[in-house]
Image (cartoon, grey):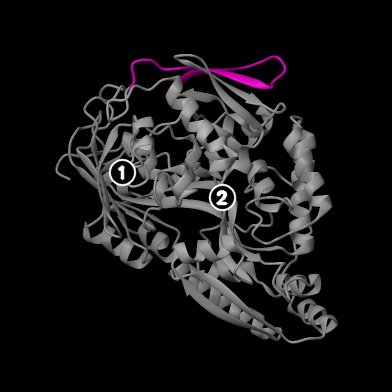
Amino acid sequence: MDMKWRKGFRQLVMVATLSGFFALVGSGPALCAPASKPQPGGTLTVGMENEFRGFDPLKAAFFSLSDRSVAMAVEERLFDMDAKGNLVPELALSAKPAKDQKSWTIKLRQGVRFHDGTPFNADAVVGHWQRLLDPNNKFFARLAFESIVSVQKVDDFTVRFNLKHPWAPFKNVISAPQSIAVYIPSPKALKEDTQNRAPVGTGPYMFKEWVANDRLVVVRNPNYWRKGKGYLDSVIFRPMPDMQARFASLQSGESDVIQTDRGASILQAREDRSLKIYTSFGAGAYNFLLNEAKPPLNEPLVRQALAHAWNQDLLLKADYKGTLPFAKDPYGGQIICADTSYRNYDPEKARKLLAQYGKPVELEMIHTNTPRGKDAGEIMQRLFKEVGVTLKLTPLAEGQLAKRGIGGDYQIAGWKLMDFDEMGPSMLGNLHSEGKHNFVKYQNPKMDELLATQQMSTDRKVREKALCGVATLINEDAIFLYGGGRRFHVIAKAGVHGIDNVRHGVIRVSDAWLSRGK
């Protein structure tokens, strides 16, 4: 991504995060002022939204919000990225592009070992990335980085990424904390086929146990290469799909930290002096997919009518109590588009479009069996009924929803666009006519042309114009309905410290510590 472009978005995220933090924290910290330096010891219990998918990229395919914090505790990336778009060394020391921008040479850190004793080196990096790039392995997100031709070993601690063309998103692709591809796993664990259920990395915490639908436990790595880091004895990650129960567990002391997007819980936490709220904005969006391959959604008039029947503002006020931003595009402030032809709530226009279609419209919506999914479904059902559309609601577990969505077995599906700081590769995968993530079965040569332009260009203005064109086609052709932008909320007891940075909803337990007496 162009540095100035990224800088503007990062600054927006920083301002939003800090302003959100100070506005929401209230007086909690005054009750439990942190010590002058981190104190070692103790167990942190974290309430997560969902059961974990797994940690082998080929098997898990992608990370849910719950997986991200576990991955960052156990595994590590080549680089992190700071608020200005600069790569921050993690397992790598430096990244240097070639003059033609068609390759990047990366120097690796020496003296690091995986938890199983395997040395971290170029072989580990090359083996991991070539495994993902191999078309025979059919990695779910491969299209998002198809501009990477190969990764080769230069010497024991140097690797080179070879690109098809100069590629603006490259730095983000090797550092994004929400991407399953960026974490370097143990070659031994991959070879023994244990990585998915018992992840092995180089991080500050080591995997101990995973009891399905109950807990995933990690313990401090005594041989961590960053001496002194990893302050806790252990961390217990607990999946709690019911968001009210998750918040109640925080109030009762069963949990120390939780993830949530429930407006009622967030508002209640603001009034509780024993709690702290950490907030960050993200790109991506909550959205609803309209499957063009399933009649009557193959008719533009029907999709456009549904877009005008949908009232995003009502959902945000009723369900999220104003704690999520309104979304007209997938970029969340990453880029600013003057006009994307967003179809505002207009039930009269919806009725006219349906009258032009001239046939009864009966649809099914699949959604998660969570309060979020249920509430959104019921609001959509009521709004559609007001314009004469019958909507059947089918609640599903997240895994079932993902399976039907990926397989195209739906008409309308509750979904999430991933929150990448660089949305170009994600849009390519989701909307190109040959995109592997094109679950709405969208076919539009103009969209393909725009996606190709943003993919090939490194010019900020050219890419921004193309991506704004992508957003406009989404709204004109009504292939997504938006259910709010992405904003992440983490609520913690006042005695929990070191988790201020919750970008992308990640709870960075590597820096977490507890006040004595907790």
Check if residue 92 falls in the magenta segment. Answer: yes
Image position of 431 (left or right of 179): right
Pointer 1: what residue? 198
Q: Quadrant of residue 371?
A: bottom left
Mark yes or no: residue 463 visible: yes
Q: Looking at the image, is 496 positioned above or below residue 409?
A: above
The quarter of the picture where residue 245 lies is bottom left
Q: What stretch is highlighted in magenta?
A: 90-112
Q: Which of 307 and 139 is in front in this view?
A: 139
Residue 391 percent location from the top left of the image: 61, 81
Q: In this view, does 286 lie above or below 207?
A: below
Q: Where is residue 261 in the image (x, y as percent from the top left)?
A: 45, 59
Left or right, 308 with respect to 43, comes to right
Query: Quick one: label 1 or label 2, which is nearer the N terminus?
Result: 1
Q: Nearer the viewer, residue 415 or 54?
A: 54
x 70%, y 75%: residue: 309
Which quadrant of the figure contains the C terminus?
Answer: top left
Q: Identify the secondary structure beneath mark 1.
A: loop
* Residue 67 on image: x %, y %: 40, 48
Question: Where is residue 135, by image quadrant?
Answer: top right
Residue type, label 1 = Ala
